[in-house]
Amino acid sequence: MAQSAQLNASILKKVAMALSGIFLITFLALHVSLNFISILSEDVFNEASHFMGYNPLIQYVMQPVLAFGVIFHFVMGFVLTAQNSAARPIAYAKYNGAANASWSSRNMIISGLVILAFLGLHFYDFWFPEVSYKYIAGTAPDATRYYGELVHKFHDPIRTGLYCVSFILLGFHLWHGFASSLQSMGMHNKYSRFLAKVGYGFAVVVPAAFVIIALFHHFNQ
């Protein structure tokens, strides 16, 4: 009975992890779409960013939910990693990881930690200045400032390189994470193979778009 309860708890953790991951994937799709506008039109990017920055629903409902989703996803990742390690207290005598699983699946915790560090840099670059601008300094709204602030962050080649490396590792994380999420939720039907292909495409296109945005603004200053 105790073993069955432990198994059910483990399954629930994996499902919760999968759902939080899919929730964050939808945010990434929105985020990359908004940022890609900066390549196409400075004015439209400013308008969209100003709307997002001052819309009460986004600021006071969706933003806290997003923050909770990010924290929950990473905490569950560490919990499941520790749980898997504890389940195998004795190391295999010989284990060739590359022969049994892809690099992305074997190093999810590494790519996750890099992404977590990247989020810290991203908050430092954009979220903290935004909070200071609106709530601490109480500066009057300026709907034309967003494009200039974005471009300025990609002036430094080291910072731009860090962003690009983080986006590439995000791609590896998504490559395994999306398929793993479908498996955790028990999606083994006629649509699962198609959804897996969509996930692989997402894992390539979205990080590549972020890299293109960073390099575009770095080399066009």
Image (cartoon, helix red, strand yellow):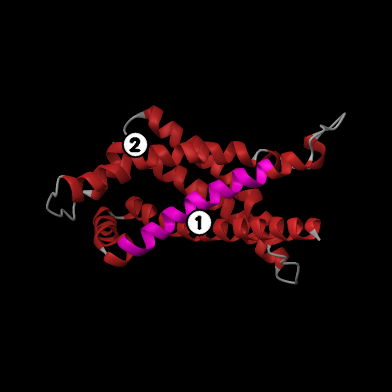
Residue 71 in the image: state x and y as whole percent. 48, 49
The quadrant the C terminus occupies is top left
Magenta-colored stretch includes residue 65: yes
Task: Tell which of 183 and 6 is nearer to you.
Answer: 6
How many other residues sit within 10 Å of disc 2, few (<14), some (14-19) or many (≥20)?
many
Q: Which residue is mark 1?
A: 24
First along the sequence among labels 2 and 1? 1
Q: Is residue 167 left or right of residue 52?
A: right
Q: Which residue is mark 2?
A: 154
Q: Residue 120: percent from the left, percent from the top?
A: 41, 39
Residue 218 lies left or right of residue 168; in this view the side is left
Is residue 50 shown left or right of residue 189? left
Q: Image height check: is 66 above or below 99?
A: below
Residues at badges 2 and 1 in contact (C-beta under 8 Å)? no
Q: Specify the label residue 62 is tagged with.
A: none
| Range of residues picked out in magenta | 60-82
Q: Main secondary structure of the magenta part?
A: helix
The kind of secondary structure element at disc 1 is helix
Disc 2 versus disc 1: nearer the observer: 1
* Label 1, residues with CA under 10 Å away: few <14, some 14-19, many ≥20: some
- Please name the amino acid that badge 1 sits on: Leu
